[in-house]
Amino acid sequence: MARPKYEIAQIIKRFGSDFVSQCQPNSFTLRTLDALQQCRTQTLGGHKDRCDSCGHERFSYNSCGNRHCPKCQLPKQMLWAEDRMIDALNVKHFHLVFTVPDRLNEICQLDSKAFYEAQFDCVWSTLRNFGYTHYGVETGAICVLHTWGQNLSLHPHIHCIVPATGLTLRGKLKDIGHQGKYLYPVKMLSSVFRGKLLEKLKGQLKKNNQLAQHQHIINECYVKPWVVYSEPSLGNVKQIVNYLGQYTHRVALSNTRIKHLDASGVTFSYKDYKDQANVKLTKLSGIEFLRRFCMHILPYRFVKIRYYGILGSRYKKEVQPLKDKPDLTKAVETKQQRMVRLTGFDPCKCPRCKAGMMISIEEFPKIRSPVNVFYPNASKRYF
């Protein structure tokens, strides 16, 4: 696949200083932008390779590994998907998406970490209660947080994959979800989730003495109907993992969606779901683009993929009968060998002769410049 013409790193390099001066982001956001800008450049160091057959040489630079970097997610996504394939239960699964009204974005921006934690807690509490009340079992879920819409707007929502099985109070596995097309009644699910989340947000605002000034938002959201998207059961284990893998290691905007970059701003593509998901173009100024992009930088060490109930580590022994037996004769692979098998591409093979192997002959250390990327006149780096 050809490399995209434009990248997030180019936008940060071009508009980063103006964005920092105008919006004054926190230090963690600055560190993230700095990492994305330096990804696969001389700053992070690298190595020089030479083919042991034809003598071809190339230079390779290290990746930043940041979870918000669009260039560093594919290996993580593929390895995660294969690991989940091994651990998946051989039962039907259901896909649900818990969304919140955009009216709550104002509260989310007060303390995004507390807001996202509340979302996770209320999603699992709702699913767990419905598992007990409808089927009398302890169910489970894999939950993945997304915070963006197609146009980079703030749209926090949680994707959930729920297995059609659960543990009874006697510790026996019981099939669920066979009574209808969907796992739970959607309208009931939405109203219960709404009540739980708004009550939790009220408690957080009251604790921080902010409830009075945001009480009108809470009242509006109580009246407004909420939507939990529910889909019929998915197919086999492979289809389930491949489907969920699309949602796990995404970033707010991939480089392939950036269509043009100039002094006036950034043009990128998006799907307009109000118009049958047709792909359209939109343009934002460089500062506005970075402002929206930074809204989706998750808080420091925040966990965006979580495992609940019988899909957590606590119930590994109980759900073992629903898993495929491991192949003990299979040779142990390194991470690099796994990636070659999954992608069909071996980066160690010579790109010129296609026969020799690229051998590292020289290593380049990281370059620690004393000049700040966004504050050129500063005497030292902020991060």
Image (cartoon, rainbow, N blue to C red):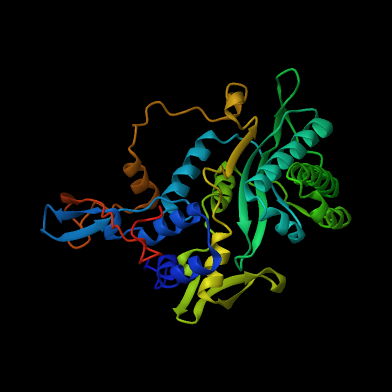
Q: Position of residue 292 (x, y in %)?
A: 58, 65
Residue pictured at 39% horizontal, 73% vertical: 5
Give the total of numbered labels.
0
Quarter of the image where one finds residue 38 = bottom left
Kindly give the residue lying farthest to the right in the view shown: 223
Residue pictured at 40% horizontal, 56% vertical: 35
For the residue pair 44 and 330, the one nearer the viewer reads as 44
Q: Position of residue 146 (x, y in %)?
A: 61, 53
Q: Position of residue 1 (x, y in %)?
A: 38, 65
For the residue pair 214 and 245, the one nearer the viewer reads as 214
Quarter of the image where one finds residue 221 = bottom right
Q: Is residue 294 left or right of residue 92?
A: left
Residue pictured at 50% horizontal, 44% vertical: 81
Kindly give the residue lying farthest to the top in the view shown: 170
Residue pictured at 76% horizontal, 20% vertical: 169
Quarter of the image where one finds residue 50 = bottom left
Q: Position of residue 107 (x, y in %)?
A: 72, 54
Q: Is residue 61 left or right of residue 24?
A: left
Q: In the picture shown, does residue 249 fall above or below 133?
A: below
Q: Is residue 269 left or right of residue 35?
A: right
Q: In the picture shown, does residue 150 fall above or below 129?
A: below
Observer able to see residue 71 = no
Observer able to see residue 227 = yes
For the residue pair 267 and 332, the one nearer the viewer reads as 267
Q: Is residue 136 left or right of residue 12?
A: right
